[in-house]
Image (tube, grey):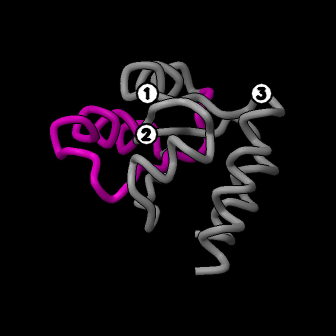
Amino acid sequence: MVNNDRLLSFLGLCKRAGFLISGAETVTKAVNDKKALLVLYATDVSENSIKGVKKAADTVGVPVREIDRSKEELSFALGKHCGIVCTTDRGFADKILELV
């Protein structure tokens, strides 16, 4: 549980630093543009929502991880309704992978 709280805090920091993109369409675009380095999604994201993102990420080799948090928890931490996010910074991506 502590790691998950640290994860949400770190995602908030990533967002404030300008290295977090949210929303299925914008994340898919970032993946296709080879800007996304890591994709994360909440446990309650629908399979339809994540399917296209996973397909694009698999094509270009971007890791995709489900985090043990709901869309509501992720949205609260980021101050914006979302269930799918990605980071565009290598340092943030590496640290997030440690926390996941």
Q: Give the CA distance from mark 2 to mark 3.
A: 16 Å
83 or 24, nearer to the observer: 83
Dot 3 alpha-carbon crowd within 10 angstroms: few under 14, some 14 to 19, many 20 or more: few
16 or 99, nearer to the observer: 16
Q: Is 71 situated above or below 30?
A: below
65 or 84, nearer to the observer: 84
Q: Which residue is mark 2?
A: 84
Dot 2 alpha-carbon crowd within 10 angstroms: few under 14, some 14 to 19, many 20 or more: many
For the point 64% across and 39% down, the residue is 87
- In the picture, measured across the screen, residue 28 lies left or right of residue 9, that is left
First reached walking from the N terminus: tag 3 or tag 1 = 3
Q: Which residue is mark 3?
A: 18
Q: Which residue is mark 1?
A: 23
For the point 64% across and 57% down, the residue is 8
- In the picture, measured across the screen, residue 35 lies left or right of residue 75, that is right
Is the N terminus in the top left, top right, bottom left or bottom right quadrant? Answer: bottom right
As helix, strand or loop, the secondary structure at mark 1 comes to loop
Q: Position of residue 31 (x, y in %)?
A: 49, 29
Q: Magenta segment, which residues?
A: 35-61
